[in-house]
Image (cartoon, rainbow, N blue to C red):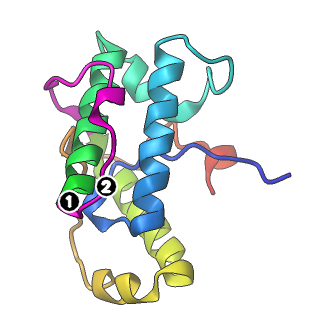
Amino acid sequence: MERIILRLWSLHPRYLDPQGLVALWREALLAQAVLQGNTRGYKSHPQLERFRARRNPVAAVGAYLVAVCDEARERGYAFDRTKIAMAKSHKPIPVTAGQVAYEWQHLLGKLAGRSVEIHRRLRTVQTPQCHPLFEITAGDVEAWERPSARE
């Protein structure tokens, strides 16, 4: 059985291929369910640490989901916005430049294998934008990006 790894990208969802965008939506909805206490799995997943550190973790993941839903709408997809528990704005969450760089390389690797044309278009991007919920700060890869959680 394949091990499922939760990936809540710090990168802007515009960079994801269709499979990646749909997967992000599903994984962020799962994260929302975990933070609401509605599921038994993934409770201690390291990707959730930055949301749990917020005063209102469900609002934080809701703000994350809103941006994913907005990107899907831009592409003509019909993600169900009513699934977002708390769709309101949230203060930016810091993410290190090292984390963004790590995720960028990770995403390029995934795209090279499954979405060659998108990879070709994105490989020249020098400074990728982060997800609108995040604000880039100085630093290396985040502590929650544990080697066992890396895909």
Would residue 106 be found to the left or right of residue 104 on screen? Answer: right
- The disc at residue 129 is 1
| Mark 1 or mark 2, earlier in chain | 2
In magenta, the rendered stretch is: 74-94
Res 151 quadrant in image: bottom right
Contact, mark 1 vs mark 2 (Cβ under 8 Å): yes
Do we see residue 137 in this rendering? no
Q: Nearer the viewer, residue 65 or 104?
A: 65
The amino acid pointed to by label 1 is Gln
Residue 75 lies within the magenta run:
yes
The amino acid pointed to by label 2 is Leu
Q: Nearer the viewer, residue 137 or 109?
A: 109
Res 102 quadrant in image: bottom left
Q: Nearer the viewer, residue 121 or 72?
A: 72
Relative to 69, say whether 39 is above or below: above
Q: Secondary structure at mark 2?
A: loop
